[in-house]
Image (tube, rainbow, N blue to C red):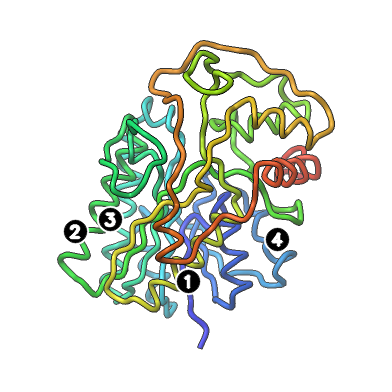
Amino acid sequence: MKKTVLVTGGCGYIGSHTVVDLINHGSNVIIVDNLANSSIEVLNRIKIITGVMPLFYKLDILDREGLEDVFANNKIDAVIHFAAFKAVGESVEKPLDYYYNNISGSIILFQIMQKYNVKNIVFSSSSTVYGNPKTVPVDESFPTSATNPYGWSKLITEQILRDLHVADNSFTVAILRYFNPVGAHKSGILGEDPKGIPNNLMPYISQVAIGTREYVNVFGNDYDTYDGTGVRDYIHVLDLSNGHILALDYLYKNQGQVLITNLGTGRGYSVIDVIKSYSRACGRELLYKICPRRAGDVAVSYANCDHAYKTIGFKAQYNLDDMCNDSWKWQSNNPNGYEK
């Protein structure tokens, strides 16, 4: 029998790609999304790719009554929880908004799951929970901390899930700490469409490539790295969505477990590496400008992914050129994102 999976934030960047994978792997999908940082057009794109229009509720997870109606009217087997504010800089400016939305929203979701006996959850966490790691590669045994409210909101929600499992060990939990998701669907019709000025490197480079912005800001070129710019683990969104499918399969087969694992490629690319790769993808040299370092940025961060391979069989398939080529295909086909 088909499993029914509720995806909070399912119209967002990572959520929408995961919904496509879920449908292609035979799941029924229900999306809950308030469309605060996503577009209703995503549903049409999902249908074009999969032939299926997922059941959709325009709903904020802080709306307890509305969310409870979703559970009352559907037999849900599992939840994949993406719904959260996600801009690090904005979280510093608006900490109360981030704690209220990300933590209170999660608590409401978990309470309703418990009430309706839905005990399988995959939680979208982040490598930000490692704070400023002293060494690389970063593995799951590293101490956790945070340098901003966004990171703390993820770490606190992780702890809530662990405590929930201690109190009720029928809860089966996967906490996925992923590094820097980039790229787009191979079709070029589903991708990242940030609102306003992008907070992350790849969508910013995409806007330079399409001509919306003049140059890329490179924050610091005096780090102790091979070209002086920061090095990060970038992972293709298709690899990331596949990681959620593998984690969900693991939960179905290992009831009552808590899985905490990294999702990354296991190697680092510098900012200049990404700009050069994207330049090859779009066929022209992209301009960049060296700016002062940003407070809190670390020189190098990339994942140790051995645990993910051993537990759920996860191994990233795509390299940096794949990520940039697919990102450019999406951006060039959709210069204004999902807007007509």
Query: Residue at the spot x=35%, y=68% of the render?
Result: 68
The nearer-to-camera label among 2 and 1 is 2
Tag 4's secondary structure?
helix
Which of disc 2 and disc 4 is earlier in sequence? 4
Q: Position of residue 233 (x, y in %)?
A: 52, 40
Element carrying mark 1:
strand
- Image height check: is 107 above or below 270? below
Q: Nearer the viewer, mark 3 or mark 2?
A: 2
- Of the residues under marks 2 and 1, which one precedes in the sequence? 1
Nearest to viewer (mark 1 / mark 3) = 1
How crowded pointer 3 is (Cα within 10 Å; few <14, some 14-19, many 20+) is rated as some
Residue under label 3, please give it.
Answer: 107
Of tags 4 and 2, the one toward the viewer is: 2
Q: Residues within 10 Å of mark 1 (few under 14, many from 20)?
A: many
Residue kind at label 1, given as amino acid type? Val
Which residue, given by chain and number where applicable, does mark 4 sit on? 44
Side of 127 relative to 239 (left or right) = left
On the image, the x and y values in percent for residue 187 come to: 76, 56
**Which badge, 3 or 2, is on the more N-terminal residue?**
3
101 in relation to 76, above or below:
above
Say whether disc 1 or disc 3 marks the residue closer to the N-terminus: 1
What residue sits right under mark 2 in the picture?
A: 163
- The disc label shown at residue 288, or none: none
Mark 3 residue type: Ile
Q: Which residue is mark 1?
A: 5
Q: Earlier in the sequence, mark 4 or mark 3?
A: 4
Relative to the observer, which residue lies in front, 51 or 272?
Answer: 272
What is the three-letter code of the residue carrying label 4?
A: Asn
